Structure formats: structure tokens, C-alpha cells
Amino acid sequence: MLTNIISIVTLLVFTTATYANPKIEHWLTENGVPVYFVAAPELPMVDIQIIFDAGGAQDAELSGQALLTNAILSEGAAGLDADQIAAGFDDLGARFGSSSQRDMAMLSLRSLTADSALEPALELFHKVLIKPDFPQASFDRLQKQVSLSLQAEKQSPSAIATRAFYSNLYGNHVYAGMPAGNEQSLQLITVDTLKIFYATHYVAEKATIVIVGALDKVKVKQIAQKLSANLAHGKPSIIAMVADLTAEKIVNITHPSSQTHIVMGQPAIKRGDKDYFALYVGNHILGGSGLVSRLSDELREKRGLTYSAYSYFRPMRQAGPYQLGLSTRNDQAQQALKVLRDTLVKFIEDGPSAEELIAAKQNITGGFALRVDSNSKIIGYLAMIGFYGLPLDYLDNFNEQVNAVTIEQINNAFSRRIHPDKMVTILVGGDAE
């Protein structure tokens, strides 16, 4: 019954709630964990995330251990097995989630706010967070699942291209590896290494708590204090700066497919970069706006070389990639790559037109309300703001920052930051036999 109720509530959140300007409150728990809270009283539910600086960038020599650590936490805790934990959340109408990326790992809980549902859900969530059992049988199963996933990657040109792109883009930097790890490191990971990773990285100094829901601040403070009070103490992480590329690098990987997948890019910007909005708006015109972008016009509409082409910035704690890409027939790969490069070069040299800039601003700001129209979307932004230390008024000022961007700022930012002659280019395909 409760599961049906929360499903209905969730549907209502996604279809009726609107939060154009969520008010963010911020404080520290008694042991120094940052908390970010947005009150959303419209519906009787709450979303909670606790985010750790415990993503794949912390893997060191054992690539993939961050992912496995995050995945195993709900497999057994405080003497409860995975089935008991899952049934416990389900019986309360609550939803538990976990994920691990390059920079961060997180645990999440969605629950109704009635004490009869929220209190036991929080208690179970706390057990998963603080008292994981690391069962060997679950580890063996998860390890096998990751191994099968790595095998499946070998059949996917896009996955091969992405892995090669990050490896060649970042070299010896911690961002070079994929969060899923690799076959060699996977065989070296054990339950004991996951226990060490957990003890090192799931600590107060690496935690951020974000909460969105129909609760008052007093209750939210109690929840945050409960979740953080028993976290061990450790040391914050430092991720080295990413080195700029000094030369162009082209990697051709033969793969039995009729399409060639092309990925091109460079390390670009980190979260909070002063050029972010100029680059973001400019890229929306170049390749971030789908079928109406310049890349799509040149590659799809004018020449029919691809169904879609894209470009985007992925800011991270240190310089994340600026990535451009497409897929095309093998016999058109070199032509498509040339058009991709030429379009980028021309955009850097000439910049956008006044009409393009107006259209981009209208498209970005016009769709802003849809980005914060549900608890789940707000908490995603809240996690980003909290983890990366962005200003609390980031969402309030987003449209203003977009509208303030000028053609001159776009031209200046792209000419300084984007270097087509020093990019990594990966081509996967060329062999349809």
C-alpha cells in the first residue's frame, strides 16, 4: 500500500511541482559535514542524499574499487542481508539508491515524511551507511557483473571510443580510468580492499548532505546530525591539476562495425570556472542544442554525414573534458571528421551571430523552469552546488548569468580555452567484416 502511495506522490512531483527559485539553506553539522536544504512543502515526501568524495578518481592503482564499494554497501548491513534491506525499504514505501562517478559517490533515500515511514527508513538508511557487512557472496556476484559489463564493452564502439578518449586525454591523471575499472584491476580487488576504501573515503571530511522535502529546518537538522554523527574522521582528498595537451593525438581503433564512432576533445574547465557561462552559451550554439546546432546543420542537414552530432563541456573538480562527437558510415569518417574540425575552427574564429546568441539565450532560459520542477531535479543541482562549493545563489542567478553573456565574451573564452590543433581524436570502426 505504501509503495503505491509513494509512486503516486512521485508522479505528482514530476508533473505538478514547480520550483523556479528554490531557496537554499546551508549549515554544518556538529562534526563539520556541510548540509544543504531546500524546503519543498507541496507534497509529503523528502529526498536525502549523502555525497562522498569517493568516486573513481580515488581508485589509485585499483581502478573500479570505488564503484564496487558503493555497490556493496546495500548488500548487507548490521546483520541484515540484501533481501532484507530491499524489503525493508519497500515495505516502508521508501526508495534507496546509490551511484559512483569519477568525482563522487552517493547514497540516496526517498521517503514519505510521516514519522511512521520516515523514521524507520532513516534507521535502515543509517545502517547501510554506517554498518556495512561487505558479504563475500555479494562481492563475488558484483565482481562477476562488472566483469561481464567489461566484456560487453568490447562489442560497443561507443564504449570503446569513450574509454580510449579518457585514457588518451588524461594519461597518468586519476581521471584517465573509467569508473567501472578494467579487467586487470578487477582481479586484484578483494573484500578487504573495499573495506579499506570505505574506511578511508566514507568519512566526515569527505561528506556532503543534501535534503529536499516537506520538512522544517529543525527536523532536517536532526536528520543530518543522525546521518553524520557516526561517520569516522579522515583526511580530505586532493586531486592534482590536469595538464594541458601540448600536441594533437589521433587514435584509430579497428572494430567490426559499419559505423565509425568519432570522439574529439581536450581537458577544458572545472566547476566554478569564470568562463563557464560564456563557454556554455557558446557551445549551445555550436553543438549543445541538438538538431538546430551548427554541428548538426553542417554535418546532418547540409551533408547527410550523420544522424546527430554533439558537443558539451563536462566540468569536474579539476578540468573535465570538452567533448565533440558523432557516428558515420566508415567510408565517410574522414570527411565527417574534417567537417567537425572545420566547424569548430570557424566558430572559434568568427563566433556566433547576434541572431544565434538571442536564440540560444531564449532556449536556455526558457527551459530553465523545467530543470527545477521536481524534488529529484532540485536535489541533483543541490548535490552539485554542495559538492563543488558553488555559490548558494547559483540557481537564482543562472538565467541572469546566461543573459549577460556577450558575443565578445564567447569569442574571447573560446579563443583562449579551446585549441583544435591540440586535441585527442578517437576513431573506432572501419572494419565491417
Image: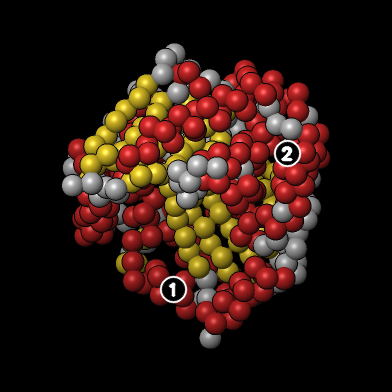
Type of colouring: secondary structure
Disc 2 to disc 1: CB gap under 8 Å? no
Residue at 77% in and 38% down: 355
Residue at 52% in and 27% down: 342
Q: Which three-letter amino acid code belongs to the residue tagged 2?
A: Glu
Q: In this view, does 274 lie to the left or right of 310?
A: right
Q: Which three-letter amino acid code belongs to the residue tagged 1?
A: Gly
Residue at 39% in and 29% down: 425
Of discs 2 and 1, which sits in the foreground?
Answer: 2
Question: Quick check: can you spot residue 229?
Answer: no
Callout 1: SS: helix
Q: Nearer the viewer, residue 195 or 279?
A: 279
Checking the image for residue 135, the label placed there is none
Place of residue 77 in the rendered image (x, y in percent of width and height, measured from the top left): 36, 60
Q: Name the residue under label 2.
A: 356
The number of discs equals 2
Crowding at dot 1, Cα within 10 Å, few <14 / some 14-19 / many 20+, comes out as: some
Callout 2: SS: helix
Q: Which of 415 and 317 is in front in this view?
A: 415
Vertical order, 303 against 7 (above or below):
above
Q: Nearer the viewer, residue 274 or 383?
A: 274
Checking the image for residue 88, the label placed there is 1
Vertical order, 266 against 160 (above or below):
above
Question: Quick check: can you spot residue 292?
Answer: yes
Image quadrant assignment for residue 9: bottom right
